[in-house]
Image: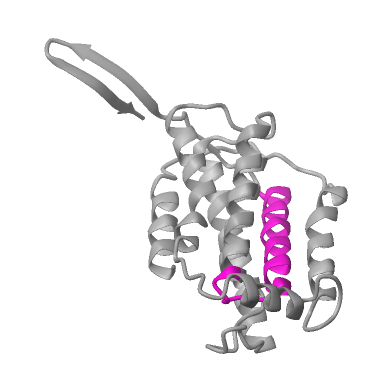
Amino acid sequence: MKNILLIFLSIVVLKTNAQNDTTFYNKKYNYKSYIIPASLIVYGLTTFNNNGFPSSISVKSYRNENFKDFNNISDDYIAFAPGLIMLGLDLFKVKSTSNFANQSAITAKSIILTLGVVNLLKYSTQVLRPDGSAKNSFPSGHTSFAFTLAEVLHQEFKDKPFIYISGYALATTVGAMRILNNRHWFTDVMVGAGIGMAATKLIYATHQYKWKMNKGGFLPIIGGNQAGFIYQF
């Protein structure tokens, strides 16, 4: 997961080749937009250990009874899917809220903030993973990362519900698989999802749009005996 994350961040940062602009956009905080991530965090905390409904203990028991042998590492890769969808849409010049330079900067900052908060909590709370492998269970890093990218996808393509809903669906799949793989408690996943969404919203609210950059895209080429696509920056 760490190696893949470094590669992903490298792609995001290296593509941000932009020119400075003196135009800034001041955004007001929309506190209502934090209701859903805050609710996920609060609800997740109420399900800690044997509390709430469903409690983390009861979810683990259900998993052990019905999916005891479940073991699948695809959640390591699905977590990147919302971001890859966004990159693909950018390559084909699908209209988004931000140009590629600002979008890349926002994505990088959102990931850094999310993982900073997650790791601070992991190593300060010392919660034992359900499989007993380590004391860094709370919250789920995979889930928070996936929801960070899903939230960026949402912010960039708000007018295309089928796109951002697919991002949230993929992020939810990651969270479910972390539980099925016995790597995280229900609490870890819910709080991780809330952190990823909230951190991304905060970055969007505070980001200053410094760059102008025309989006690149694929153009078809047909001539002679050749046919295909070229990427125009």
Quadrant (top left/top right/bottom left/bottom right) for the N terminus: bottom left
Q: Residue at x 41, y 43 (%)?
A: 17
Left or right, 9 with respect to 201, comes to left
Whether residue 80 is in magenta: the answer is no
Please provide percent x and percent y for residue 76.
46, 63
One can see residue 148 in this view:
no
**Left or right, 158 with reference to 100:** right
Residue 51, compared with residue 27, is above or below; it is below
Quarter-of-image position of residue 211: top right
- Can you give x and y, in whole percent of width and height, for residue 129 in the image? 61, 84
Please tell me in which quadrant of the rendered image residue 226 appears. Answer: top left
Q: Which residues are the magenta region?
A: 180-207
Q: Quadrant of the C terminus?
A: top left
Q: Is residue 223 above or below residue 58?
A: above
| Residue 29 seen in this snapshot | yes
203 sits left or right of 55 in the view: left
Q: Which residue is farthest front?
A: 65
Residue at coordinates 55% horizontally, 43% vertically from top-left? 103
In the rendered image, the vertical position of residue 61 relative to residue 191, given as above or below: below
Nearer to the camera, 172 or 224:
172
Q: Residue 207: image x %, image y %? A: 66, 49
Name the residue nearer the viewer: 78 or 23: 78
Q: Relative to residue 63, is residue 25 depicted above or below?
A: above
Give the farthest residue toward the left.
225
Q: As rendered, which of 26 and 83 lies closer to the eye? A: 83
Quarter-wise, where is residue 153 in the image?
Answer: top right
- Residue appearing at x 46%, y 40% in the figure: 87
Q: Nearer the viewer, residue 224 or 175?
A: 175
The answer to whether residue 205 is magenta is yes
Residue sitting at x 57%, y 84%: 131
